[in-house]
Amino acid sequence: MAATEPKGHGHHAGMWVFPDASAMSQDVSAKTLSMPKPFTLALMVTGALFILGIVGFIGRAATDGFDEMAPWGYYMAIFSWIFMISSAAPLAAVAFRFTKSHWRRPLSRVAELFAVVGILNLLMFIPMMFLLPGLGNPGGVVEGQLELRRTIWFEGPIGAPHAWDVLAVASLAVTSMVILLLSAMPDMAESRGTATGFRGWVYNRIAGGWYGTKRQWNAQKAGLALLGAFYFMMIIFVHFVISSEYAQSLIPGWKDSIFPVIYSVTSIQMGLGTCLIVLFIMRRWGGYEGYVGKSTFWSASKVMLGVTLLWAYHLFAFFITFWYGRLEVEQNIIKYLIVESYGIIFLLNLVFSFIAPFVLLIWNPVRRSAWGPALAGLFAIFGGLMFSIRIFVGSANAAKGDEIYAFFLEHVPAPAYPDVWDVFMVIGGIGAAAFVYLASTKLFPLLSLWEVKEGTLYQKWRKFIRGEYLVLGKPE
């Protein structure tokens, strides 16, 4: 057997697991190569949705072209939703490695695999470069218009904003892929002798020179630390760029330093929540119960609760600033994005990004379970979808033509409702992200074998007087 039964009793039953390191590689490799019917069905369904999304994109392009941004609002929203998840999920592996959290070991590879989805997201970003208008007013300056629309570019360097935007998104995607490959290298080296076909070719090309020497392990550890620090800095910057370029700069007069922070917090909440959903599926139906204990969910739920409270705080800070400002443009933005035009979407965003996860995660029995934090994660990603629709559909449809160069938003625009192509693109985008992630699990194991094996050396279940306790060693 690859894993022993979970230890504990009472409400701690199944909290900690103690895998058998000697049989782990063979067991996880068999799971990686297997194609059970539920997995095959999920792959087929998500693949069909992927195709549906492509049909929606082609239909939208043939109908409206790329001259106007307004028809592409829902495409921008689904790009943002996937981007927030795929960029923040690898941060979970990076951050919890920094803190040397023992419970994060089963979570690491699940989080890092979202780097592959980031490559899909980079391809989705290419059409958005053609949609974003230039900085300068092409019609010349007239009364009530700006010479340059308000953006983060003060002087407009060569290539701004388009070249710099795509460079930022590409840098984030490439960095996360390098982190994934560097982390997976020891596991690839262990399996390169038995892997065949495409997997064998990839493993030999990436891990051909890995032999597990002390120097190589030290180099890998240092590399993950440096790349992780760089990724943490990059993700905040790129979130700032995307939220400013494709949201704030498209609504005349919207100036807010808090909104990029809300964007990043929403992204982190969704990224961690999605990882917990994947872990729950692995534990409940994937045969990984002997590797993923409830302690992972229990510990992650505390972080999830903190991020949820942080989201509510920044939403309040955003709203109260505009509410007390009382300028016409500030009142119109509140009416447009929160109260009137997208009021229902905002309520759904508020319920599923804050109220539902908060109520769920403050309940101790739920927080100690495996399903509770995963359900909170599901609420968070739906709330994040509502957030993306509210912000990016609203931004794309706030100003038409030369109105984007206006000094401020003079009226409250009507909401933009989806048509059939929008529905296809939103559903197809969700399916595409799921399809790419599922396909990546057949190339990379869902568990970081070297990290989980390392964890088995530091933990033991022992009795002391009348009680039983987890004894956990610290390597450093």
Image (cartoon, rainbow, N blue to C red):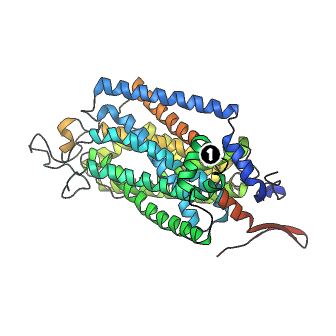
| Residue at figure coordinates x 29%, y 44% from the top left | 332
The kind of residue tagged 1 is Ile
| Residue at figure coordinates x 50%, y 35% from the top left | 432
Q: Nearer the viewer, residue 114 or 174?
A: 174
**Left or right of 360 on screen, residue 310:** left
Q: Position of residue 106 (x, y in %)?
A: 66, 55
**Left or right of 69 on screen, residue 112:** right
Disc 1 residue crowd, few under 14, some 14–19, many 20+, Cα 10 Å: many
Q: Is residue 191 above or below residue 211?
A: above
Q: Position of residue 24 (x, y in %)?
A: 74, 54
Q: Quadrant of the C terminus?
A: bottom right
Q: Nearer the viewer, residue 126 or 267?
A: 126
Helix, strand or loop for disc 1: helix
Q: Is residue 92 above or below residue 69?
A: below
Instruction: Identify residue for label 1.
Output: 277
The residue positioned farthest toward the right in the image shown? 466
Q: Position of residue 220 (x, y in %)?
A: 55, 66
| Residue at figure coordinates x 53%, y 59% from the top left | 182
Q: Nearer the viewer, residue 114 or 322?
A: 114
| Residue at figure coordinates x 53%, y 48% from the top left | 114
Task: Answer whether residue 184 is visible to the viewer in this image.
Answer: yes
Instruction: Choose top left, top right, bottom left or bottom right for residue 264.
Output: bottom left
Instruction: Choose top left, top right, bottom left or bottom right for residue 42.
Output: top right
